[in-house]
């Protein structure tokens, strides 16, 4: 019961907190945008694979939005979000043709190499990409309306919470589907899937493309709230943050990615204000403690509580 309503609870709490405390809107949107990418990474973790380069899809989505906005200045914000998400879909479909063949450390390192090639290229071609300074993206209209900064942030927060609920429902249905069940089986016995007549590569390819789509949407939201696209969006450190969030929140349920994302963003925010030069130490300490106390992530506590309530009700 708690798990079922957890995405709605996160959406409502985030929206109410943003309306009551306007300074929270930006960190909330950034945190939720990270959650979509972490959810994409969680799909691969469910198959027993870890990608150290999925931030590349977020980065490509951001730059794709800039290109569309430059050639179509009147484009609505939803059009830009769609363009960024499509960029994640197309790039994921192309990269997945190669990535679906590899597993374990080879898979992780190949994704890392891909992201670092993109990072290097974006930094070198200054005339096209703005180099390390990046490119600005002008504040788009929504439904043809020119919005002030406060209204614009409210719109982005509202869009984020709506898609949080939709993504959690969509991915939960995917987990329960035959393809989602086969994806989990990849982690335990890939050979058995082949004996059953199920193509392990096809199952993994679909999950990889889906994860790239989620990362593309994540990068699109991040680019809109930041108003700037830089090569750092595709750096390996950002990919590591996505993995950290997935581990922090847990992969048992889709909502775990967003629980971990909100926790990570505000932990980083307050740690950076309290310990300006050592906030990474706080993040690392939290991860170590979590591994010992809740190896399945924060959402595992919610799952246990849900089961206890169900037993008492029975």
Image (tube, rainbow, N blue to C red):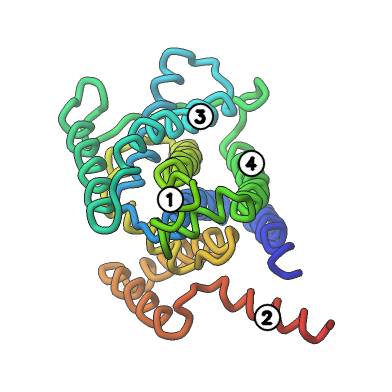
Q: For the residues labelled 2 and 3, say whether their Cβ atoms are less than 8 Å apart.
A: no
Residue indicated by mark 1:
194
Residue indicated by mark 3:
139
Q: For the residues labelled 4 and 3, say whether their Cβ atoms are less than 8 Å apart.
A: no
Mark whose residue sits in front, 2 or 3? 2
Mark 1 and mark 4 lie on one chain; the one further toward the N terminus is 4
| Residue 204 locus on image (x, y percent) | 43, 46
Mark 1 and mark 3 lie on one chain; the one further toward the N terminus is 3
| Residue 243 locus on image (x, y percent) | 38, 60
What residue is shown at x 80% (from left), y 86% (from top)? Answer: 312
Tell which residue pokes out farthest to the top in this image. Answer: 71
Q: Secondary structure at mark 3?
A: loop
Mark 4 and mark 2 lie on one chain; the one further toward the N terminus is 4
Residue indicated by mark 2:
305
Name the one closer to the observer, 29 or 43: 43
What residue is shown at x 69% (from left), y 67% (from top)? Answer: 3
**Crowd rating for badge 4 (residues with CA inside 10 Å; few <14, some 14–19, many 20+):** some
């Amino acid at each position: 019961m708690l798990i079922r309503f957890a995405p709605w609870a996160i959406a409502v709490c985030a929206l109410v907190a943003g309306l009551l405390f306007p300074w929270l809107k930006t960190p909330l949107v950034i945190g939720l945008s990270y959650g979509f990418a972490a959810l994409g990474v969680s799909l691969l973790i469910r198959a027993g694979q870890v990608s150290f380069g999925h931030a590349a899809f977020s980065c490509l989505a951001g730059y794709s939005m800039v290109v569309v906005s430059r050639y179509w200045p009147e484009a609505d914000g939803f059009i830009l979000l769609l363009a960024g998400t499509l960029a994640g879909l197309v790039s994921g479909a192309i990269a997945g043709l190669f990535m679906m063949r590899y597993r374990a450390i080879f898979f992780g390192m190949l994704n890392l190499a891909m992201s670092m090639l993109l990072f290097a290229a974006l930094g070198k071609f200054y005339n096209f990409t703005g180099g390390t300074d990046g490119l600005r993206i002008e504040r788009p209209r929504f439904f043809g309306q020119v919005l002030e900064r406060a209204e614009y942030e409210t719109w982005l927060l509202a869009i984020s919470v709506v898609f949080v609920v939709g993504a959690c429902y969509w991915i939960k249905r995917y987990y329960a589907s035959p393809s989602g069940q086969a994806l989990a089986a990849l982690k335990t016995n890939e050979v058995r899937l082949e004996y059953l007549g199920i193509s392990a590569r096809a199952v993994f390819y679909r999950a990889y493309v889906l994860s790239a789509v989620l990362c593309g949407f994540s990068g699109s939201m991040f680019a809109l709230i930041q108003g700037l696209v830089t090569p750092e969006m595709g750096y390996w450190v950002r990919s590591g943050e996505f993995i950290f969030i997935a581990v922090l929140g847990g992969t048992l349920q889709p909502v775990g990615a967003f629980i971990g994302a909100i926790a990570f963003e505000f932990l980083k925010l307050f740690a950076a204000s309290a310990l300006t030069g050592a906030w990474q130490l706080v993040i690392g300490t939290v991860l170590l403690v979590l591994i010992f106390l809740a190896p399945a992530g924060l959402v595992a506590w919610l799952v246990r509580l849900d089961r206890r309530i169900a037993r008492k009700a029975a």
